[in-house]
Image: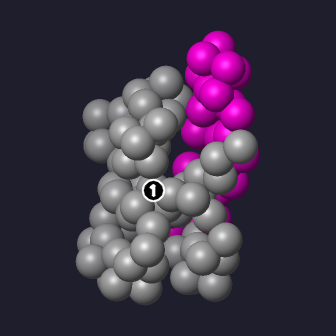
Amino acid sequence: MRKILLVCSAGMSTSMLVDKMMKAAEKENYEIRVEAHSISEARMLGSSWDVILLGPQVKFQLKEMKNAFPDKPVEAIEMRSYGRMDGEAIVKQARLLLKD
C-alpha cells in the first residue's frame, strides 16, 4: 500500500480530493492511503509518507518541502487536475513519481 500525503494551506480543500483519489485507485486495484494536511502538519508528518503532493495554493513551498524531504518524491499537483478535482489524474501523477 502506497501512502500519499496531500498538502494545502489549511488541509480543507484538498481533503475533497481524498475520496476521488481513493475511488480512482480502487478502479485500478492500486492500494493507497491518502490524507490531506496543512503545510505545517506536513512538515511534521512528511517523513512517514511515500509521496508528498502540494496543492496549487502552497506550490510556493515546493522547494522548501523538497529540501525537508530529499529522500521522497515531492511535487505540486497540476492546477488543472486540482481545479477539476480529478482524482484519476492525481493518482496517475503519484504513480509516476513512485515509478509504480
Between 31 and 17, the one lying in front of the other is 31
Picture residue at 71% right of the left edge, 43% below the top: 1
Judging by the rendered image, the residue that carries numbered circle 1 is 53
Picture residue at 64% right of the left edge, 47% below the top: 2
Q: Residues within 10 Å of mark 1 (few under 14, many from 20)?
A: many
Q: Quadrant of residue 35?
A: bottom right
- In the rendered image, residue 86, in percent from the top left (x then y), is placed at 46, 27
* Highlighted range, magenta: 8-37
Classify 33 as above or below 85. Answer: below
- In the rendered image, residue 51, in percent from the top left (x then y), is placed at 51, 57
Instruction: Residue at the far front: name it.
Output: 99
Instruction: Residue at the far top: name it.
Output: 27
Judge whether residue 99 can be spotted in this image. Answer: yes
Between 88 and 13, the one lying in front of the other is 88
- In the rendered image, residue 88, in percent from the top left (x then y), is placed at 49, 24
Q: Quadrant of residue 63?
A: bottom left
Residue 29 within the segment the image draws in magenta: yes
Picture residue at 66% right of the left edge, 76% below the top: 45
